[in-house]
Image: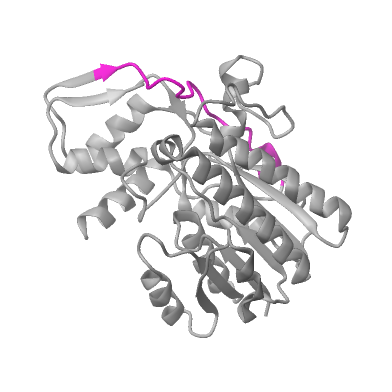
Amino acid sequence: MARHLVTGACGLIGFALTRELAARGAHVVALDLGAKYGLGELDVLAREHAGRIEPLQADLADSSCLAHPSLRGPFDAVHHLAAVLGVAHVSAHPWECARVNMLSTVNATELALRARARVLVFASSSECYAAGVDAGRLPIPTPEDVELSISDIEAPRWSYAASKIAGEAAVFGAARENPSLRPVVVRFHNVYGPRMPRTHVVPELFARCAAKEDPFVVYGAEQTRSFLYVDDAARALALVGDPDAAHRGVFNVGSGTETSIEALLEACFETSGYRPRVIERRPAPPGSVARRVPDVTKLARLGFQARIELGDGLRRCWRERSGR
């Protein structure tokens, strides 16, 4: 039985990955700080997959947690997804974002080395492309082998992208000095699904539909994103992080389909059954990226294909929100 460590296991993607790996027969140590909701949902998931999921509450930004018996390994794979994120939160707390994200990544990498992991998967972000895309230096769809940059190092919102770029460098540096460790970096593009907090666009739009807002204000309707359902993201992670495979390097994880916020809004209206009489379209917030579309050719070469179309994924989110 393969042994995996998933950090950030209470988060949207970490929870889905934990479930996916356990369903494939792996043993998973599911680590999370549990600051928001505790580990209740992980405990339920552990009961559903008896003996294969071990929930663990720990602060990965504190190196003393590495001494915990459950983290001594050995592990076949370490999947580091734990991070401070969310544009509003990061913009208000840039030091927390930089400190926690960089410390937790250093500790996760050290843990992978101590536990003799064969592969370390680091969750990065499409935010690493944002400055280059907005400056017109990067192509769209955006492949993995392009420059990563920060447009304004003093701007609080860029603390997240900076922490991810630093994390990528740390992971590849560790693998360079320790050839037995295979490095994998995944740059996520707008993963969505049930259990997502309202600070993200899909649950926010659905919450406002449920409240029957009218007029309905939308910012940056002309902007585009690439939406990937969380179960598809978990399958992609399990694929690139397979300890028995030879995959290494950077992989974009997204749908590859460019969708405008206007089209997303219309799909949310159709799914919820609510349409306001007045829609007010306003400019996007300062610093918001105009277009975000990954080139997913590299992931597709491994045999990955998204299974859940946007309409189906939105219906799943709405049903979960409505308790049906």
Horizontal arrangement in the rendering, residue 17 relative to residue 245 (left or right): left
Residue drawn 55% across the image and 36% down it: 159
Q: Is residue 270 left or right of residue 170?
A: left
Q: Residue at x 70, y 62 (%)?
A: 242
Tell me if I can see residue 305 in this picture.
no
Residues 35 and 52: in front is 35
Nearer to me, 11 or 253? 11
- Look at 60% across and 15% down and name the residue there: 135
Residue 99, x across and y down, in percent: 57, 47
* Left or right, residue 188 beside residue 271: right
Q: How many marks?
A: 0
The x and y percentages for residue 257 are 51, 33
Q: Quadrant of the N terminus?
A: bottom right
On the rendered image, what quadrant is the C terminus found in? bottom left
Percent x, y of residue 125: 58, 40
Looking at the magenta stretch, what is its main secondary structure?
Answer: loop
Residue 87, quarter of picture: top left
Q: Which residues are magenta?
A: 281-301
